[in-house]
Image: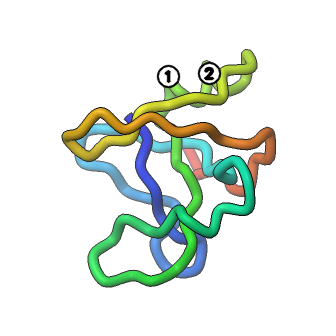
Amino acid sequence: MAIVRCRERHSPPQGKTHSYRLGVAPAGDGEGVRCGHRGCPHKGLVWLDVPEAAQFQTGEREFHLHNGYQVKFRVSDAVVMRANG
């Protein structure tokens, strides 16, 4: 499940149960997508875990957010960051 973290301070994320590999830009201007780290005001990148990164590579652009709710969002084609590993 994807998460949102800013590029300035909280990327790449170190997930406890997910290994996040690919940071992609949200679709549109991204103004409404903010870092999910408590108290962080920065715009966020959408971080995809390993299976989602593979889906992204095959053209999928809609993913579910890891937050306990059913939130689905669309990402752009732009890969912004890659995690080591």
Rendered-image quadrant of the N terminus: top left
Q: Which quadrant holds residue 75?
A: top right
- SS at badge 2: helix
Residue found at the very far left of the displayed protein: 68
Q: Which quadrant holds residue 72?
A: top left
* Image vertical order of residue 83 relative to residue 19, above or below: below
Name the spot of residue 58 as percent of width and height, x first.
Answer: 73, 16
CA distance separating discs 2 and 1: 5 Å
Q: Amino acid at mark 1?
A: Pro
Rendered-image quadrant of the C terminus: top right
Name the spot of residue 54 as percent of width and height, x first.
Answer: 62, 21
Residue found at x 51% / y 60%: 12
- Mark 2 touches mark 1? (CB < 8 Å): yes
Mark 2 packing: few (<14 Cα in 10 Å), some, or many (20+)?
some
58 on left or right of 50:
right
Q: Which mark is residue 51?
A: 1
Q: Amino acid at mark 2?
A: Ala
Q: Nearer the viewer, residue 12 or 73?
A: 73
Name the spot of residue 68 as percent of width and height, x first.
Answer: 19, 40
- SS at badge 1: helix
Residue found at x 65% / y 29%: 61
55 on left or right of 17:
right
Mark 2 lies on residue: 54
